[in-house]
Amino acid sequence: MKKLIALSLALALLLALGLPAALAEGEKTTVVFWNSWTGGDGDALQALVTKFNESQDEVFVDMTRTTSFGDMLQTSLPTGEAADLVLLNCNDMNKYDGYLRPIDDIWDATALEEADFSTAYMDMAHKDGALYGIPFQISTFMMYYNKDLLEAAGIDEVPTSFDGWTEAAAKITALSTEENPVYGSGLFYCYNGQNQSVIQRFGTDYMIVGDEESGFKANLLDNQAFADAMIWMKNLYDNGDNPKERDIDSMMAAGQIGLMTNGGWLKGTLDASGINYGITRLPTATGEGLDEYALGDLNCFMLTTSASDETTAAAYKFIEWWFTGSGLEAQEVTQNVDYSGITPNAEWSISMCYLNAYLPTVNSTEYQAEEILVGLTPTETAQVQMFSAPGTLFWSDVAACNADYVEDWVFNGPTNPTYDDVQSFFAPYQDDLEGYIADYYG
């Protein structure tokens, strides 16, 4: 989709007369850019896009951030009226098969080099031998904690196990008053990514395990780690240590939550709120590292088939700038830190606490100085996606199933559940997963 921005009445007259637009001076090629970054991180992204638009006179990035991102793509891609550029999870490439534009020529069109990106993550951005994405961020889930609530509850160390989480949550909830209700735990029954990140830290695997060669199978039943996770979660809700609310982010920003799991997108919101918070790795059931699990998603810059050759070339300029340009120079949205000496890509990771797949950023002095980022960095063999094996066609269905069964379990599961209760309750969801596998093989 190509749009030309007219900067004068003279240009409008030229176009009305049918004269070539290239005769006009000062025009920019507009790249329509859609994404779902509507939280605090979206404000930082908007500031960076504005910086790009002001830094040159060839390209204008027209960005829309919306909670209706998926619906917009579904309706506009078939008609050729979608955005040129999108931020998309790699596991959604199959969902939009045929509507994404291969971008293998980006290495020739820009100064970017494929060797500068982590091989493990670049492999995820390929499909059938073609490149469809450039890594934007690794959306790792982590634990946020309210330092003031932990101190008030007499908790000296941040929990590293889920038994420790339970104990700390009870102590923090005990601080609650009618005028100022607080909760020690902030799990999201309706947020499937956050829930699955916690579930996997109990030691379980994907909801569907296996591969094309050996076959796939559902993994909810006869799974002690999964059962332990669900029992732990249900008890926190039933004990009153975890609110049955949907907007846990706002409660955390209001100082009402002690411990929670979330991604880097929450960081900007908490910075703006003034909450005294910390970030660390999620606990594990044993208190030991399980670095193979709960790492989150890989989001990429991707081009749609709605993009013309001209808007594709313009989008390449923006993507190249993202990795090689300069930062915001201490704007408030990035916590009054001077980023003028580093790239927008590095600024994004450091200010928003997102892991990075671009090796010049990862190896930079500024990135390596961030203990949280370095501490969250996964092993080379770690699972990148949490619901099913990366790239499988049933990924979206499995993710939705996770959201359904957690909410159902929280509101309709038995009190003081046992292992056998878990087997009975989740049998229908196991059947759903088996159905997805059957559909996958057609």
Image (cartoon, rainbow, N blue to C red):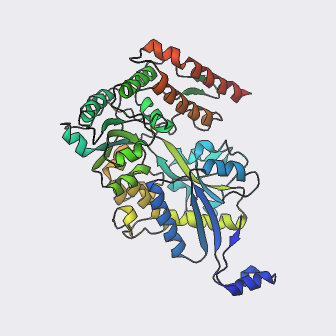
Kindly identify the residue that appears in the image at 81 percent across and 81 percent down.
Answer: 18
- The image quarter containing residue 57 is bottom right
Front residue (pair 244, 435) = 244
Note whether 395 is above or below 433 in the view shown. below
Residue at the limit of the structure toward the top, as seen here? 420
- Residue 133 image position (x, y, % from top left): 60, 52
Front residue (pair 2, 292) = 2
Q: Quadrant of the N terminus?
A: bottom right
- Residue 363 image position (x, y, % from top left): 39, 55
Res. 187 visible in picture: yes
- Residue 22 image position (x, y, % from top left): 72, 81
- 442 lies left or right of 245: right
- 101 lies left or right of 157: right
- 270 lies left or right of 343: left
- 375 lies left or right of 112: left
Residue at the limit of the structure toward the front, as seen here? 178
Res. 214 visible in picture: no
Residue at the limit of the structure toward the right, as seen here? 18
Note whether 77 is above or below 162 in the view shown. below
- Residue 275 image position (x, y, % from top left): 30, 51
- The number of discs equals 0
Note whether 401 is above or below 427 in the view shown. below
- The image quarter containing residue 282 is top left
Q: Quadrant of the C terminus?
A: top right
